[in-house]
Image (spheres, helix red, strand yellow):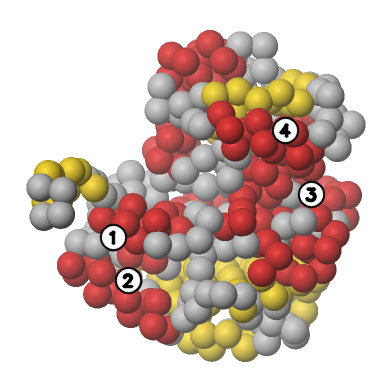
Amino acid sequence: MKVMVLGAGAIGSLTATLLARSEQVDELVVASRRLPPARALVKKIGKKHLTAKQLDADKVGDMTKAFKGVDMVVNLVLPRFNLKIMDACVRAGVHYLDTATDLVLTEDKKGDRIERTPEQIQLDRDDLWKDHDLTAMLGWGCDPGLTNVFARLGADRLDRVDEILVRDGDNSTIEGYEFASLWSADTLIEEVQMDALAYYDRRFVRLGTAEGEEVFPFPDPVGPQTVYNVDHEESNTLPLFIGKGLRNQDFKISLPKEFAEFVRIGKKWGMTRAEPIPVRSKFYNTTVKVAPRDVMTALLPVPVDMASKVHGSTCVGTVVKGEKNGKPAGWFFYTMMSHDDCYQKYGYHAVSYTTGAPPVVGFEMFARHEITRRGVFPPEVLDPVPIVKHLPDWDLPYGERPEVAA
């Protein structure tokens, strides 16, 4: 199959590197808004069936032309471009896979009545994609992605599902930095500054920025980590597709307490806004337009450049609790990886790997016709057992432990 990877950042680089080794890929194109990073990645991978291409994900017409003859587009650019990329895929007759959704497509605030989740705007295209005999696989990273698969795995074991809790923990330190984001800083700030979507008492709700502080006991070597509610894709889809009486579902991630507080304050000042504002420069005696968030992200290092400097481990998983045969039951399903080991083996830190490898699993299952569903859908609509069985194909660790049910 011919595949195009959109994006040559930390995740796009890892996914392209692995896809280049896949027996299911005959031709691979790495496309980026700026050509030099794509060319550098193709040169680094060093395979003959790879090419680099300059492509702007904001231009549907250009993408439609570029997608002609491609079998699947793997979208690893910022999720704000998802809908335009999907439009181009339909016009070009190309299958689609991504790892995140645009969480700012709706403007619900804390206390608002939630009528629709942001990801439903992508899901609304299901009939259109079925009419074109095309597949759009949404959220095939680690979280979302593996966490959704784990949620379905636990739900399938239970007669009744009471709660699904997604937890993302990391105990890493980064040489030379007191704080840095291991994935897109733009995405991190967006997720943390937004009022978090959750599903409590069988209804969607919005929580305030970085609320719900708790200490979650991740397995060693990550260990206990302080986690907070942030906005995330799992809460968009799991309550829609899991069923079985699901009462509560939320997402929490480990964050330095001072960063969570910084984002709260920055939000009040408008520093997390993505829209450009006019800024007067006294030094140059001119006015330029700058997005406040771009200033914040420019002050943080580029994730793809930090792989050798990250030490510690990451653990991401899903708690599923409910009832089986009239008795409480529950488990924590997770993936866990050492940043140091990952760098030694692959040249990337573990967050990049655990996010960038699942799309390869999904693509290969699609290429082998193990996934034949058409339309637009998240991972939890599929049988989770074959997916979990394929995780070792790309060295994705899997573990589970019993949990005391509520």
Which amino acid does the dot numbered 2 rest on?
A: Val
Q: Secondary structure at mark 1?
A: loop
- Residue, far front: 283
The mark lying in front, picked from 4 and 1, is: 4
In the displayed structure image, the side of residue 83 where residue 206 appears, left or right: left
Q: Are discs 4 and 3 less than 8 Å apart at CB?
A: no
Towards the viewer: 122 or 296: 296
Mark 4: few/some/many CA within 10 Å (<14, 14-19, 20+): many
Which amino acid does the dot numbered 1 rest on?
A: Thr
- Whether residue 123 is visible, yes or no, is yes
The mark lying in front, picked from 4 and 3, is: 4
Question: How far apart in space, not on screen, are marks 2 and 1 (Cα)?
Answer: 7 Å
Q: Which residue is mark 4?
A: 42
Q: Are discs 2 and 1 less than 8 Å apart at CB?
A: yes
Q: Quadrant of the C terminus?
A: bottom right
Q: Which residue is mark 2?
A: 263
In the displayed structure image, the side of residue 346 where residue 122 appears, left or right: left
Residue 63 screen position, x and y as percent? 50, 19
